[in-house]
Image (spheres, grey):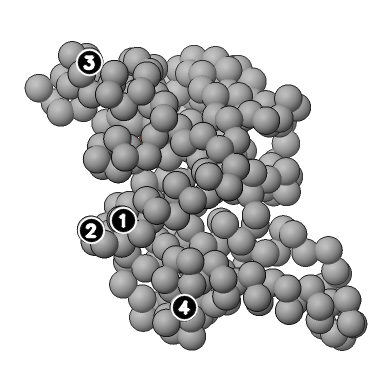
Amino acid sequence: MTVRAENVTVRFGGVTAVDNVSLTMERGQIVSIVGPNGSGKSTMFNAITGMVRTAAGSIQLDGARIDSRPPHRRIALGLARTFQTPRFDPQITVEEAVMCGFYPRKACSLFASMVRTPAASAEEKTFRERCGSILSDLRLAPFRDLQMSELPMGRVRLVEVARAVANDPKYILLDEPAAGLARDEQKMLAYEVRRLADQGVGVLLVEHNFNLIRELAEHVVVLKEGRMLLEGTPAEIASDRAFIDTYLGR
Ligand code: ADP
Ligand code: MG
């Protein structure tokens, strides 16, 4: 049970944003992509989720090629993601934002939901209950009825994670989820990410904060100018001269 990206290349016009990069993420494993700004982290992410087209290479999910499938098909196969900059309608509530995450799992038709057939009502009830437990796991329950515009940035990021978790993913890709979080919010997020992995979810984490990577990741891939500079455990990476030069800019 693996997401396997092999020799992936992505070009934007004349710019090669990702150049021949490979990475593998097993279910239950936390893998991290690090690198300076513009090194291709988000683009690699977008190639895996289908938001950008690959110029070369292949992407497999549990053994099946997915690189020609559109993003919503990949989501339905169990690949969830968060965005570096979450975009929610400012007027919807926290609960409504997380409820959006259940949409790909909906078995009942929109019509059945509108006329409230027993099956649709039962499904709605299941989703609401699951939503409640996700909100309390992420300590968002007190904010449930607030509008997204009333929420501090740290909580918005946690809502973004909650929305992705609602889809009950096999794999979850988190793009800089800790950016802008206060220390206690980061701890909560780290705890949640660890818990997801313990439940068998594969996690791909793009992150700037090396403390968080050291705490969570089993395997790290370092990108520089679109290419893979090195890979290894956080300890191996942290002691590598090339990493220190690139990452710390020395
Ligand atoms: P990172 O996430 O590591 O900061 P990105 O993947 O966002 O880096 O960007 C890698 C390179 O690709 C950069 O040079 C960036 O300017 C370029 N790039 C990213 N997205 C696009 C796009 N949609 N169109 C054109 N160039 C892009
Ligand atoms: Mg990025």
Q: Is 29 on the left-hand or right-hand side of 118?
A: left
Task: Tell me, for residue 141, which label it has, or none.
Answer: 4
Q: On the rendered structure, is 16 left or right of 187? A: right
Residue shown at 40% from the left, 61% from the top: 157
Which label number is shown at residue 187?
1
- Quadrant housing residue 164: bottom right
Instruction: Inspect the image, locate mark 3, and give the three-letter code of the amino acid beneath it.
Output: Asp
Q: Name, please, the residue furthest toward the left.
A: 250
Between 98 and 149, the one lying in front of the other is 98
Q: Which residue is mark 2?
A: 183
Decide which of tag 3 and tag 1 comes sooner along the chain: 1
Please name whichever residue, 41 or 194, is drawn nearer the observer in this view of the structure.
194
Q: Is mark 3 within 8 Å of ligand 1?
A: no
> Residue 213 placed where, x, y %?
32, 37
Element type at mark 4 = helix
Tell me the residue that label 3 is attached to.
240
Of labels 2 and 4, earlier in sequence is: 4
Task: Give the percent coordinates (x, y) of residue 234.
Answer: 31, 27
Crowd band around label 2 with a 10 angstrom C-alpha radius: few (<14), some (14–19), many (20+): few
User: Is residue 15 something that shows in the picture?
Assistant: no
